[in-house]
Amino acid sequence: MARNGNGVDPFTLEIISESLRAIGDEMFVTMQRTSMSVIIYETLDYATGLTDAQGRLITQGNGVTLFLGTLDYGVRSVLEKFGYDGLKPGDIVITNDPYGGGGTHLSDVSLIMPIFYDGKIVAFAANKGHWTEVGGMAAGSWTTDSTEIYQEGLQFPVIKIFEEGKINQGLVDLIRANVRTPDMSIGDMMAQAASLRIAERRFRELCDKYGVETVTAGIEKLMNDSETLIRQELRKIPPGVYEAEDYIDDDGISEGPFKVQVKVTVTPDKLICDYTGSHPQVLGPVNAGWTALVAAARAIFLALTDPSIPTNDGCFRPLEIICPPRTIFTAERPAAVSTYWETMLYAADLIWKAMAPVLPHRLPAGHFLSVCAPIIAGLHPDTGSLFILVEPSAGGWGAGATKDGENGMFCVGDGETYNVPVEVCEQRYGVLVEQYAYDITEGGAGKFRGGRGMVRDYRILADSAQHTGTFGRFKFLPWGMAGGSPGSRNYMKIIWADGREPLIVGKIARLPVKKGDIVRLVTGTGGGYGDPYERPVEKVVEDVRDGYITPEMARDQYGVVVDPETLQVLELVGKRAQKQ
Amino acid sequence: MRVATDIGGTFTDLVYLDEKTGQIGVAKASTTPANFAQGVIDTLHKSAIKVPETTFFVHGSTVIINALTERKGAKTALITTHGFRDVLEITRANRPDLYNMYYTKPKPFVPRYLRLEVRERMNYKGEVLEPLHEEDVRRAAEFFRKENVEAIAVCFLHSYANPAHEIRCGEILREMLPDIPVTLSHEITQEWREYERTNTAVLNSYVMPVAKFYLTNLEKNLAELGMGKVYHIMQSNGGTATFEMGKRVPINTVESGPVAGVIGAAMIGNLIGERNVISLDVGGTTAKTSLVENGTPRITTEYKIEWRRDYAGYPILAPTVDIVEIGAGGGSIAWVDNAGALKVGPVSAGADPGPACYGRGGDKPTVTDANVLAGRINPDYFLGGEIKLDVENARRAMKPIADHFKVSVEEAAMGVIRLADANMINALKLVSVRRGYDPRDFVLIAFGGGGAMHAGALARELRVKEVLIPNEPAVFSAWGMLMTDLRYDFIRTTIRRADQISAAALTEIYCGMEAVARQNLLDQHIPDERMMFQRFADMRYLGQEHTVKVPIPGGVITEEMMSEICERFHRLHEHAYTFRLDTLIEFVNYHVTGFGIVDKPQLKKLDGTQGSLEAARKGTRRVNFDELGYHEAPIYERSLLPVGVRIQGPLVIEEPASTTVVFPDQTVYRDEYGFLRIHTAYA
């Protein structure tokens, strides 16, 4: 059999690449199946992966899109702190530092394990999961009104939770004493450790079979293959400079808005994202750190080159990110960061917005963008124990050059994220879900229609509870494309049982609610694509029949007067009448 | 006479077993989509069996799955709880293709205007919060009549806890629209999660008219040929059901074909006293594998159609034998991706044009072509010589791959085989190692057209205890169907903490479910002495979502058994996930399986005195055994091999529809049933 430069035949390398990906898959499934947090096993708000001995990403299994960049940085922070000599077989390091080292906010906790073979570190297994509770000023740990990190929970500054296989019980006791749901948080930590140990075992088996040198050659090949594929796609993008700007609503403390911007420079070998000029870091907790910025840029970089590629270090070699320190995208200690995703999502959306006009087959119009996450915390009326409902909301996606926007799907930051079934939710949290439906509202008109957002009503059954929530794009709407209308906003509406004037907000912290009150979560419609008057009449009629638009919208936005009972077209009006 | 028939996309197959002689026979006819029953009748005629003497007839088909995937079902409507008609379309709102911003979600099988809401509400404890407004149901029925709806599904929130409103809604619909089939979600499953249950009910209704039409026809035709009421339909859970059930719950039959092979493998395991087996079915397009522990196939309700790594698909909460399927079969095409890496599958050359060596216009290199070039397949004896394989065509097709990697065509062919093997190994590991099982405790039973060809190499890597190649491996799935019992799975969700449920309460839940299962079997004419029940519970640590399936003792459960049940859970959790927790335990789902045991034929042992090795030997051929090198390997005809003979590899054993490759470090033994049993001398 022919050998390549490393003395290994190409087919063996291919088999090793596949085996490495299989290890990543197995880590991912192990963590999901054993986790204690809804946010991990349903939202899949976690990532697992392997890096090589230098901390270069080999493979990553993601549940959510925007964790792509956090594991390799985490491994490098472990290397910086301990060095190769400071690590022993069986060690597991815990970290959640948001300003460096692969952290995002304190709730996202990473565990990292060196993998030894023949007495040497040959790779690292790493994962990162959103713990429902890491302590701090608010149940669920993140909130919209913190102003410094010390209010946001426990900080794990790259420390060993396991030393040579033995758990640091003192640290475990400290965690248990400082979080509101100790069983859940420690349970998640054990699930994370289990997933690392599986990876260690499998990686060593691979070395047993093929030898370390061959496995290393397989890793190089995996990375180089991804780089090759990405570069081929990059060369298909017209070179040039593309710019976009937008506004973040506010930070929960001070009045916004905060201007953010990107300049994307495309050359045949490089894609440079320059965020210079974006707003300085702010008082409230919407600040993002460098890792979050990198993750956002990496994800959209894949979206506009080749979304199907195996993700590893090789993919990102042509990507360059520029942003000065202490901006809202590059916050420094002790800035509050607990709802960092509101800003990270803008980092992704800006590149998307800048590039969509030249890549309409890959990037549709703007979507509802925010994670739209509520926290409802209280005592379960049937069990008396504390419940913390934390979940992302699905919303409307933008229309594209060839299709309507998707109705009710999680935002770009999420991904293989599952909504919590109503039946599970009611049992677990003791709330009553009174509707889960599309929100038929203005916005998103176009030749291709923006997808519909959602409305979900929680009636509180506990005597009292607290509601926190952050719904970005409350003030600045999802953008339309090629003449399509913008979408609609995200918001929360509190409908009081005592008949007071309802409260409509985009951000709220620890609002007291009582039995019988309704917390209504509404997510936006996505942006439209193209002139609504070019939408075929029969499509408009079908939309009316299915109730995706009202007869009034058909008339006012699309110029089609439809009898809602018979679905007869009675008249064409507006621009459509002139065209005839 | 026991008869199994299987309607596939292109062909309808029949396998029969004469219980008196032990003789197995096969027949094949074209599938007849206009009237599927005709193809079955054609195979009965061709096989020349005496139809009235049939004692057991079992039928599997791809009719239901094809009606789903080709969207050829009925115009279906849906009734839901007020406020929740969009649940079917929202799905779980996930986007598995993480970096694709142009992703398109699965489109629902019922458009929005045919999804109507009625006022009613239960809570999770099954208490009525709002009574069913019957006038809403009547209004919906009127609308459906006007819209010429052909099937209706009903799914209300928490109907798993209390189905009263669904039942009443069903009564009204059946009274007002007597000719339109109705599915009530709780009739199929009493598991929670409203989207999955709704989708299951919808897909069931969608295929009910199709199922009814063809099964009724088939019934009529079989009766005309003089067959008694001995016919059954194969279900995805590995058991059979009556045609009546098949018409009422066709969604339970979508995977009827593939699971039969797993049941057959379990049967063979029991026969030879090896109750831990892994089945491997290598067909033209895919390879399928499943693990059988202690004689029992694993059942899952996390089944999806059209699912891909990057596409959400449609969940079906029907109990299904847990099979892992990958795109690596004989027809899978080898290709080089944009980065210059070799890939095999998932695209297949199919039956037409087929692999390049068929000489029917195929010019892409497939796994079968690679096997021909490696000397593993005899080009003059394919399908018993029916098709003469064109080696030169295979070589031409493989050339571009050889050129790309700057290796010889033979080396390229070996690379393709190794990559296909590696893909199969990953699937085999997925069902074994990755779930905490050690392959060394298992016998690998390989079948399908290509199973015997690849099993030897896979065994060497996985280090399984033994490889077994059954008789007639190409039609083994149908053979498996002949061995099935009636089976009814009943799953119900009621969440209880282990410290808050008494042994008496648990006993009551299971006895109640067994009463339902028993009635169901009685309805299918199974007498009590032929019934058997198994109990399981899906359990988890408090706070977890996913569960572990734990076997539960039958009869009255005592308090002592409760702690044993919890200990079993701890053990199984640790087995699967490497750790246990000192945390409270929850019961989530209760699962009862009712079997209606049918008589199974005794497999005849072969006469051990006939034949000789010399007579079986057909000559030698140069065969590539990968890292063990090329060998001039002796070739044997399987049917002529004497019983009880043990031969040292390297060698190849041929039969008309399959080829067994035995490596130099392996021996093969033909046992008293005629099975080939391969052992490896592990280094």
Image: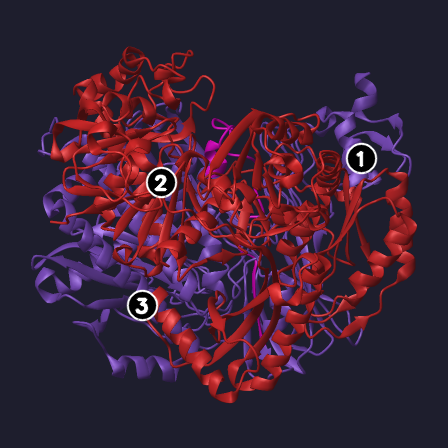
Chain colours: A purple, B red
Judge whether A237 appears above or below B170 on screen. Answer: above
Q: Nearer the viewer, residue A59 or B59?
A: B59
Q: Give the label on residue B424, or none.
A: none
Q: Position of residue A97 (x, y in %)?
A: 31, 65
Residue carrying label 2: A274
Judge whether B125 appears above or below B180 on screen. Answer: below
Q: Main secondary structure of the magenta part?
A: loop
Verify CB contact (< 8 Å) between mark 2 and mark 3: no
Chain under disc 2: A
Which residues fall within the magenta stretch? A352-377
Q: Position of residue A446 (x, y in %)?
A: 68, 32
Q: Give the label on residue A554, or none.
A: 1
Label 1, label 3: how many angstroms apart (C-alpha)? 58 Å
Q: Give the label on residue B578, or none.
A: 3
Image quadrant in which the N terminus of chain B is located? top right
Q: Quadrant of residue B473?
A: top left
Q: Are marks 2 and 1 on the same chain?
A: yes
Label 2, label 3: how many angstroms apart (C-alpha)? 46 Å
Verify CB contact (< 8 Å) between mark 2 and mark 1: no
Which label sits in the foreground, 2 or 3?
3
- The amino acid type of the residue labelled 3 equals Thr
Precedes in sequence: disc 2 or disc 1:
2
Q: Secondary structure at mark 2?
A: strand
Label 2, label 1: how many angstroms apart (C-alpha)? 42 Å
> Left of B55 or right of it: where is B387?
left
| Residue at 19 percent of width and 29 percent of height | B614
